[in-house]
């Protein structure tokens, strides 16, 4: 009777190895999904930075368009001075706003790798009759293969700044309608 009681206590080595193998299979699946989730998180963070940077570039050009009509830094006067290829920051010097864009982009998502032909970082400013058309294309490598790219394309049409303050323009329009 004593031998029967001792046999039922504890696990055999076979049972321990089988349970360890089942645990290892389950854990490896979780580890695999953790890696995928971490990569998805990194990609969404890069996408967020690309969107923020593209919006920052558009807002900077819009703010610069409020300068005097004779100011050379006004994009309506010299739109080509805001065109940029942000793949290489050494192309621009420190006071240039394009240098700031490039260094901020490198700091947030990493330097341009140039691994894929579609990986671009460009800003294009074109004057169309009275408006400015600003196109920002930011495409970065996600780091998970040659076909996995993170892309942001923003375009904005910027109207020239009013010469008169809005209140004067409104008063003149009102007086014209009343007459």
Image (spheres, rainbow, N blue to C red):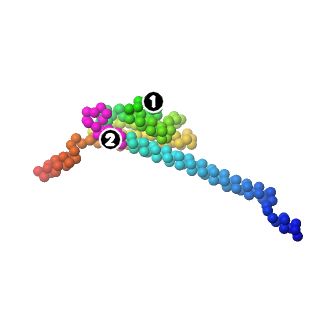
Residue 47 is left or right of residue 33, and the answer is: left
Residue 49 numbered mark, or none: none
Q: Residue at x 40, y 37 (%)?
A: 123
Q: Is residue 5 magenta?
A: no
- Where residue 90 is drawn, which disc sits there? 1
Q: Is residue 83 visible?
A: no
Image x and y of residue 104, in percent:
44, 38
Above/below status of 144 relative to 34: above
**Left or right: where 144 falls relative to 20:** left
Is 72 magenta? The answer is yes
**What secondary structure is marked by label 2?**
helix
Residue with the mark numbered 2: 63
Q: Position of residue 52 (x, y in %)?
A: 42, 45
Q: CA distance from mark 1 to mark 2?
A: 25 Å
Main SS type for the magenta part? loop
Q: Is residue 166 left or right of residue 137?
A: left
Residue 158 position by quadrant: top left
Q: Which residues are magenta?
A: 59-74
- Residue 47, x across and y down, in percent: 48, 45
* Label 1, residues with CA under 10 Å away: few <14, some 14-19, many ≥20: few
Query: If the image is split into quadrants, where does the N terminus sit?
Result: bottom right
Check contact, mark 1 vs mark 2: CB within 8 A.
no
Q: Can you say whether 70 is above or below 17 in the image?
A: above
Identify the residue at image location x=73%, y=54%.
21
């Amino acid at each position: 009777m004593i031998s029967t009681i001792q046999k039922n206590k504890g696990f055999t080595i076979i049972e321990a190895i089988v349970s360890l193998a089942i645990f290892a299979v389950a854990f490896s699946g979780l580890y695999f999904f953790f890696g995928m989730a971490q990569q998805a998180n990194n990609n969404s963070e890069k996408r967020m930075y690309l969107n923020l940077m593209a919006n920052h570039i558009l807002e900077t050009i819009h703010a610069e368009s409020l300068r005097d009509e004779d100011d050379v830094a006004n994009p309506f006067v010299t739109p080509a001075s805001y065109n940029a290829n942000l793949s290489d920051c050494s192309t621009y010097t420190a006071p240039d706003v394009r240098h700031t864009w490039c260094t901020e982009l490198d700091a947030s998502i990493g330097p341009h790798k140039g691994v894929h032909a579609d990986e671009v970082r460009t800003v294009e400013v074109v004057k169309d009759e009275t408006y400015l058309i600003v196109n920002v294309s930011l495409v970065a490598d996600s780091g998970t293969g040659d076909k996995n790219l993170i892309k942001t394309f923003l375009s904005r049409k910027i109207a020239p700044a009013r010469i008169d303050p809005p209140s004067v323009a409104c008063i003149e329009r009102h007086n014209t309608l009343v007459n």
